[in-house]
Amino acid sequence: NAGVTQTPKFRVLKTGQSMTLLCAQDMNHEYMYWYRQDPGMGLRLIHYSVGEGTTAKGEVPDGYNVSRLKKQNFLLGLESAAPSQTSVYFCASSYRWGGEQFFGPGTRLTVL
Amino acid sequence: QQQVKQSPQSLIVQKGGISIINCAYENTAFDYFPWYQQFPGKGPALLIAIRPDVSEKKEGRFTISFNKSAKQFSLHIMDSQPGDSATYFCAASKETSGSRLTFGEGTQLTVNP
């Protein structure tokens, strides 16, 4: 089992460019999450999904969109990247809504 | 979303010493309290977890102490080693229904040789 995988691992964007981060999990988990991690700020929830075809806003959703067309995949999109979106992005999944979350290795995004 | 407050933000310990990280929560309905460990360049991973029917759980050098009346729980790392240097997150939830995991702000632990 690969667990939770994320692509790409690194990316540099110019302000205004768009991109999509892909998260995939092979554990058949219903719940998936996107977080961003900034120094001294901990893990902040961007969006989450409680099942295929569903998405919901987390704590810091502005500037991001998500889609969950397949149960195993959760995509995070940036339509017009801003320097404030420079961060490390983690995807996670869980079997239970309040249960253990399994994290991917992260994507380091720099917006110039 | 109910908060989980974690302290200290950073901690420096000498090799062989005891590292202690504290967390406080608000929601008395929480019934699952995990600690996650994150090494540089990696995603967080579950280290140890406790449920409120016990006051302490030990796995090797890592111990969670839980105080239900004070709504606090802490991670103790005995005989701290340089390899324990990482960021540690506490979290809390109502596991079977109601609320997802809420994470603390994280503690950056450095163990000096």
Image (tube, grey):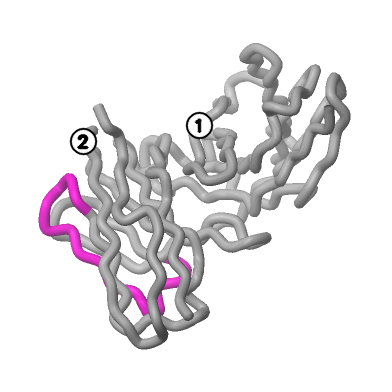
Q: Quadrant of the N terminus of chain A?
A: top left
Q: Chain of mark 2?
A: A
Instruction: Kindly identify which residue carries mark 2.
Output: A26
Q: Could you tell me which residue is drawn at 34 percent across and 74 percent down? A: A64
User: Gap between marks 1 and 2, in whole Å?
Assistant: 18 Å
Is A84 displayed left or right of A18 in the figure? Answer: right
- Residue B23 - label: none
Q: Amino acid at mark 2?
A: Asp
Q: How many marks?
A: 2
Q: Residue at x 44, y 65 (%)?
A: A109
Q: Position of residue B85 (x, y in %)?
A: 70, 35
Residue A95 belongs to magenta span: no
Cβ–Cβ below 8 Å for labels 1 and 2? no
Height in image: B38 above or below B99? Answer: above
Q: Amino acid at mark 1?
A: Leu
Based on the displayed image, in which of its 4 quarters is residue A72 positioned?
top left
Residue range in magenta is A58-73
Residue at image location 56% in from the left, 36% down from the top: B36
Q: Magenta: predominant secondary structure element?
A: loop
> Residue B32, percent across and down?
52, 34
Relative image position of residue B37 (x, y in whole percent): 58, 35
Mark 1 lies on residue: B46
Residue A6: x and y in percent read 31, 49
Chain letter behind tag 1:
B
